[in-house]
Amino acid sequence: MIDGRPFEQMGDVTRGGLVCVADHASNFVPEDVPLGIPDALLDTHIAVDIGVNGVAARMARRHAIPAHLATVSRLVVDLHREEDHRNVVPTKSDGHLIPGNIGANVEARLEQYYRPYHKALEEWLDAAQPKLIISLHSFTPKLETSDEERPWEVALLHNQDDRAARHAIRLFGEQGLTVGDNEPYSGVELNATMNRHAEAHGHYYCAIEVRQDLIATRADQARWATMIADVVGRVALALD
């Protein structure tokens, strides 16, 4: 974490421009949060959206799309869940038990990490009044608890407002990518941050998930940052 904050903000905000939000950008676990899992699991998708930090940082620094990034792992508290969601402090993930979270003080985690993250995000977005919010995630090609491989290279999630998502699906498809509505879960089920900060305020948004093996290296992160910046820029124009 940076200065004890569960978030970091990169880039200069231009009112009415584009912004990026990454709820699962970090695998950091504070020393006073004993999860009771092997350290190796912190480098997997159960702890962090692999590649997202690198893509979002490049979008902020090279493509003028400022970013609000989590600086604490989703295993400490899942910032992309509602406060009362049963997995806001997960006790298991993709078949792995998180023993340190069993009986954890959920209220304390919410107060220390979750609420400051979302309060800062709310204030940041209120100042920015963005034309389009990009919610950036990555996904594993196959869950350990499933034999089914996900069909997409990039996927879009949305709840009630699919206007930006539909443009993005078309534009990513024009890049020759396998793209569509995300599976096996949709934004109707998992859209907490965008429900709260975008749909509730009438902001357009694109919730983008990229297959994690496609953004695992710095070179790939740079390439995807350029492609995403191009696509979302054209989405914003199409929404005028």
Image (spheres, rainbow, N blue to C red):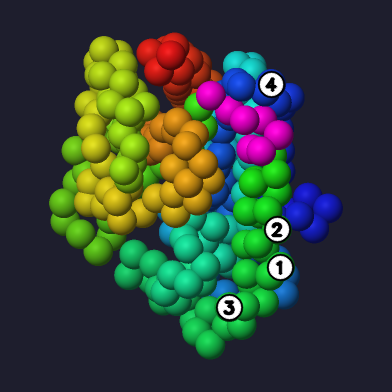
* Residue drawn at the location 36% of the way across and 27% of the way down: 164
Please give the residue where the numbered disc 2 appears in the rendered image.
Answer: 116
Alpha carbon of mark 4 to alpha carbon of mark 1: how far?
A: 29 Å
Of labels 3 and 1, earlier in sequence is: 3
Residue toward you, 111 or 99: 111
Q: In this view, does 20 lie above or below 193?
A: above
Q: Are marks 4 and 1 in contact (CB under 8 Å)?
A: no
Alpha carbon of mark 3 to alpha carbon of mark 1: how far?
A: 10 Å
Residue toward you, 15 or 42: 15
Of labels 2 and 3, earlier in sequence is: 3
Nearer to us of marks 4 and 1 is 4
Is 197 situated left or right of 96 in this image? Answer: right
Please give the residue where the numbered disc 1 appears in the rendered image.
Answer: 112
Of labels 4 and 2, earlier in sequence is: 4
* Residue drawn at the location 65% of the way across and 46% of the way down: 121
Quadrant position of the C terminus in the picture: top left
